[in-house]
Image: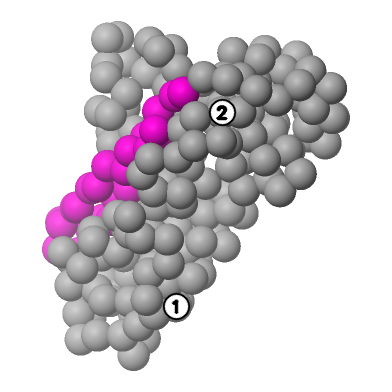
Amino acid sequence: MPCDDSGIRRLILASSSPRRRQLLSLLGIPFLVKAAGVDESRLYAEPPTELVLRVSQAKALAISDVRPDELVVAADTIVVLGEDILGKPSDPDDARRMLERLRGRSHMVYSGVTVWHPASRRMISQLGESLVGMRAYADDEIASYVDSRDPMDKAGAYAIQHAEFDPVSRLEGCWLNVVGLPLCHMGRALDRIGVRAPANVPGTC
């Protein structure tokens, strides 16, 4: 990998998310995918910011058989409305309820990003934060969007990048953080390990 002399030649993405795969490819660094199965449940009274960092670290640590020239990257993203964490909907009715709760209101999106180099025992984590305001979409728009099945694998039951539903009216913070992988934060974490991406990081905040 001709990006630097850190000794790292490849990244391992600890996620099966197609969105994270697509975004990580924008860095121009070779990587492979190894899904990490970890318990993402919230601990009692755990702040959302600590939750995403802890889970992203657990995902990174869950990857085994890592070569000395490989670096594990992991992320976790949650939607927080008031005191409630909105995860991925359990079924279409749950997706509809989430979208109705979010309609016309603002919420926070947090992402924990972790890079882990087992050979050197170095771990760097970054926290992404975005304030998202949703537009007052109509009931029939919710129904059509839920029928598309797009909400079913997304925290908060929506994708900011969905052109037809287009749910967001206002954003403060990183757009890619809401998509699920803030490359600006990933780039900073990689830099602290000594890995410099050959391409400009898009979507910086």
In primary-sequence order, the first of circles 1 and 2 is: 1
- Quarter of the rendering containing residue 44: top left
Residue depicted at x 64% and y 34%: 167
Residue corresponding to mark 1? 28
Which of 149 and 7 lies nearest the eye of the viewer?
149
Q: How many marks?
A: 2
For residue 115, side relative to residue 156 (left or right) = left
Residue depicted at x 80% and y 27%: 141
Residues at badges 1 and 2 in contact (C-beta under 8 Å)?
Answer: no
Which of 18 and 85 lies nearest the eye of the viewer?
85
Residue depicted at x 39% and y 80%: 199
The range drawn in magenta is 106-131
Callout 1 environment at 10 Å: few (<14), some (14 to 19), or many (20+)?
some
Residue 172 spot, x, y in % from top left: 38, 40
Q: Main secondary structure of the magenta part?
A: strand
- CA distance separating discs 1 and 2: 33 Å
Residue corresponding to mark 2? 134
Q: Is residue 109 visible?
A: yes
Disc marking residue 144: none
For badge 2, the amino acid type reads Met
Say above or below: 164 vs 34: above
